[in-house]
Image: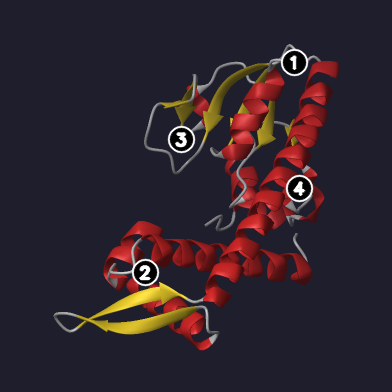
Amino acid sequence: MADNSTTSEQSAEAENRITLDLLNAVHENAQASQRSMASDLGIALGLTNAYLKRCVRKGLVKVAQAPANRYAYYLTPKGFSEKSRLTAGYLKRSFDFYRHARSECDDGLANCAAHNWNRVVLVGTGDLAEIALLCALQHGVTVVGVLDARSTGTSFLHVPLAQDMSNFDAVDAALITDVSKPQRAYLSLGDALPRDHIIVPPLLGFAPEEIEPSAMWGDTS
């Protein structure tokens, strides 16, 4: 499982992302209400309020009285500087993620091809699944579909999307591509495949052998 340092890094990354999104929202529309910001950012109103107060305390955002008893929010010079710093960091991390993800998906799918595991299912939607689909073209491996228990659609890009492995026939191997809940994705496979036929990219931060056998049938939420 991910160690404490990894968890702290993920928490800091999430905080930086919310802060960057909030600074961008303030920059784009100083008259926006906290409620509309929360809706645009996809976070709770209370969390938006807390982050705004933190940005004000840090001198990144200033508040001014607006008509009709409302408030307007403006970026300070320090706020513009912080927005630029966070944006540069996000772009670097995005590039690093793509580079590592491409390399690890290549390795995992090459391993499948070497074992003649030619029909592979991806477990989890998102950026990593998109990268894996591109990599599969280079290894003669067929991605028969994407498994995601939280999915509501029927396709992901050009392949079938399903909530249960029973929707896919003759699957040889699986590649975990759920970045947010990789262990839950791993456990969702149950006994559908031998454990050594399940590929876990190292960037996901855990190894199958670190999961207690008793957890296989426990709470995977």
Q: Earlier in the sequence, mark 1 or mark 2?
A: 2
Q: Are marks 3 and 1 in contact (CB under 8 Å)?
A: no
* Nearer to the camera, 198 or 134: 134
Residue kind at label 2, given as amino acid type: Ala
**Is residue 71 at least partly visible in the picture?**
yes
**Is residue 196 at least partly visible in the picture?**
no
Which residue sits furthest front? 77
Q: Which residue is mark 4?
A: 203
Vertical comparison of 29 with 146: above or below = below
Residue 102 horizontal/vertical position (percent): 74, 33
Dot 4 falls on a residue whose secondary structure is helix
Q: Are marks 3 and 2 in contact (CB under 8 Å)?
A: no
Q: What's the residue at 79%, 46% (across, down)?
A: 202
Which residue sits furthest bottom? 57
Q: What's the residue at 75%, 32% (across, down)?
A: 105
Q: Earlier in the sequence, mark 4 or mark 1?
A: 1
Q: Are marks 3 and 4 in contact (CB under 8 Å)?
A: no
Residue kind at label 3, given as amino acid type: Gln
**Mark 3 and mark 1: span between their CA atoms?**
27 Å
Residue kind at label 4, given as amino acid type: Leu
Residue kind at label 1, given as amino acid type: Gln
* Nearer to the camera, 68 or 186: 68
Q: What's the residue at 27%, 71% (across, down)?
A: 33
Q: What's the residue at 47%, 84% (across, down)?
A: 56
Q: Which residue is mark 3?
A: 163
Q: Which residue is mark 2?
A: 44
**Mark 3 and mark 4: span between their CA atoms?**
24 Å
Q: Earlier in the sequence, mark 3 or mark 4?
A: 3
Vertical comparison of 135 with 204: above or below = above
Q: Earlier in the sequence, mark 2 or mark 4?
A: 2
